[in-house]
Image: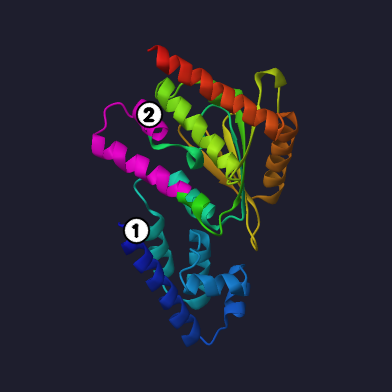
Amino acid sequence: MANGSRQAVWEFFGAELKRRREDAGITQVELGLRVFVSGGYIGQFEQAIRKPQLDVAQRIDEALQTDGIFERLCRKLIDDPRYADYFAGVVELERLASKICEFAPTLVPGLLQTAAYARAITLAANPFVTDEYVDEMVTARLERAGILKDATRPEYWVILHENVLRIPVGGPTAMADQLEHIVRLVHERTAMVTVLPYAAGAHASIAGMLQLMDFGDAPPVAYTETSFSGTLVDDPAVVKRAHRAYDLLRVAALSPEASLALIESAAEDHRRCASMT
């Protein structure tokens, strides 16, 4: 579904929600109380500013007795074939987050990736796919990163393990370009990036990447991912533990200034390797 078509359906979702709510004689605040979000969120759903998660759409159906129409619309809209089933909801949450914190143990996070880096990652995992498939995946990755260009962009904090700087994904030129892209984002104050060096030794890392998301008027969530699956967690106790793990990683990482110097040095190393080939 094209972006314009998706937005049109979200607008229909909002208009239909408003009509059904008003027909039921319920205010935005009252509906929000019934589905466990704020009345302001209901208003933003109706204006297609924010997109409700599937469980919220299901509760709206229950509250307004709408026979599943909002669940069906929501499923259609978040069912993007460019993303794995376990990741589609994360993409929507990223667009709503006021703050995103990530730990990347081996690869540059998607929100920071260049086209060449994303292409190399896609081909490494899918060596027999068509060029059209690769182009679609790369486009999707770059579209996700668009949230960092919005006026309402989230605070974005990233901890990269030193592995990420050293593995020449896509070759030395692509890797140098990728690290220089990160440096530019840091200088533009779009992202705060620090590095967990090899010298840190044992640390509070989990098996895979970790992403934490905070929201203006909704509980925080955590997302963890391994090679073939991901888990979105909203249990308060588990999310609290994930935040503690991230705090421990943060204190073990280099300072922002030392991290930037290391990223720049690694980029220069990759650039030298490229000039020798």
Q: Earlier in the sequence, mark 1 or mark 2?
A: 1
Q: Residue 40 placed where, x, y %?
A: 60, 73
Spot occupied by residue 63 in the image (x, y as percentages of width and height): 53, 75
Q: Which residue is mark 1?
A: 3
Q: Which residues are magenta?
A: 116-145
Task: Report the quarter where the C terminus lies.
Answer: top left
Residue 175 vs residue 277, the one in the foreground: 277
Question: Residue 65, relative to residue 260: is it above or below?
Answer: below
Residue at 42%, 31% (x, y): give it.
117
- Measuring from the top left, give residue 270's x and y in whole percent: 48, 20
Q: Which residue is mark 2?
A: 120
Task: Please tell me whether the stretch drawn in magenta is mainly helix, strand or loop.
Answer: helix
Q: Amino acid at mark 2?
A: Ala
Q: Which residue is rendered at x = 44% and y = 73% of the image?
A: 14
Between residue 55 and residue 207, name the one nearer to us.
207
Q: Identify the residue at horizontal 52%, vertical 60% (top origin).
A: 55
Could you say which quadrant of the image residue 70 lies in? bottom left
Amino acid type, label 1: Asn
Q: Quadrant of residue 204?
A: top right
Q: Is residue 142 magenta?
A: yes
Q: Secondary structure at mark 1?
A: helix
